[in-house]
Amino acid sequence: MKALQYREIGAEPEVVEVETPEPGPGQVRLKVTAAGACHSDSFIMGLPADQYGWGLPLTLGHEGVGVVDKLGDGVTGLALGESVAVYGPQGCGRCYQCAQGKENYCPRAAELGIAPPGLGAPGSMAEYMLVPDARHLLPIGDLDPVANVALTDAGLTPYHAIKMSLPKLVPGSTAVVIGAGGLGHVAIQMLRALTPAMVIALDVSVEKLKLATEVGAHHVFPSDGESAERVRELTHGRGATAVFDFVAIQPTLDASHDMVAVEGDVVLVGVGAGTLPSGLLAAPYDSVVRAPYWGSRSELFEVFDLSRAGLVHVETEVFSLDDAPEAYRRLHEGTLRGRAIVVP
């Protein structure tokens, strides 16, 4: 079968021929119908050898939808041909967090060598993929796999980030989204669907600010040294109730710090890194900084229900598996309007 693999540090991923996997006991083989490309993939492929730790060769793709193609011994509750989505942040299945469906926070996953598909384990950028346990598969029914595959990360991640701030996003509140790209444009829709907050989007790209307006942002501004002042002007000096930073590099961290309100949330979703001041006099009183990761299995059901209700959609550009390297080039260049979807 064909698969898109990252094979050499610093090189572009390649489409190669590999053996079609056979499911062992408890495993499920999917015939992949759609796979999503993500900045996380681009991030790890940009790391030097001394920081890269996901193994080579690596079949990419941690967003995946497919139809059940073959069942390993002992698998029950799934029908051949059933359309399912893959829950990516897989855990041990036995700890307290996993018992709540929060496998994204499993404390034993690294210790046990459990890695998400495409981020250590073979991913969805292939004609077939193996899933280690049926519990990682969510039925999607008649949802379009191509239109909805990115919700497994680009939907689940912002939903989880927003959900924890919902008690603060009351009438009169303000939510700021920094980075209106693949995840950010979905976050804007979720904020509009779930809260009465005024939504402000910031980005360095004129095209992405246009997309932010199209999907429901009340105000859009360039993400620059004046963005915090603009937010404070719009909020009559109060600042933002919650800032969702989908970039999380030092300039956006600084802006988040400068614009967040007393008792506000700074939610760092992007994979960048930097520092923020802390302490009684270093930040607004009782403001909180969070760094959420992905989301729970139950939250993914909720995300798909938002899609079924027509409240959330993902802007997509579709590529064949043979053209998948071009999808990653476009992702790296920042020229995608939303998410790149690969259809084997």
Image (cartoon, rainbow, N blue to C red):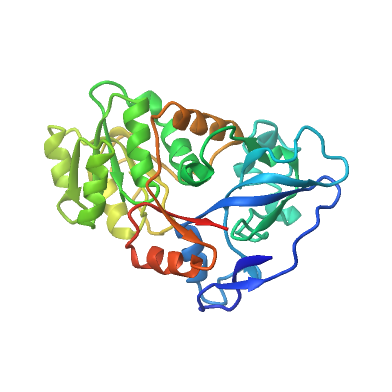
Q: Nearer the viewer, residue 140 or 41?
A: 140
222 sits to left or right of 83:
left
Residue 67, given in percent of the width and then of the height, sits at 66, 44
Against 149, is 61 above or below?
below
> Residue at point 23% right, 54% down?
207
Against 281, is 322 above or below?
below
Labels in figure, total? 0
The quarter holding residue 298 reads top right
Residue 117, given in percent of the width and then of the height, sits at 64, 55
> Residue at point 31% right, 22% down?
170
Q: Nearer the viewer, residue 230 or 90?
A: 90
> Residue at point 71% right, 48% down?
108
Against 129, is 151 above or below?
above
165 sits to left or right of 17:
left
Does the image show residue 283? no
Residue 17, given in percent of the width and then of the height, sits at 67, 72
Residue ranking furthest to the top: 171
Does the image show residue 328? yes
305 sits to left or right of 131:
left
Query: Split into 4 quadrants, where in the image is the C terminus?
Result: bottom right
Query: Split into 4 quadrants, where in the image is the N terminus?
Result: bottom right
The quarter holding residue 306 reads top left
22 sits to left or right of 4:
right
Against 302, is 247 above or below?
below
Residue 238, given in percent of the width and then of the height, sits at 19, 32
Q: Nearer the viewer, residue 316 or 304?
A: 316
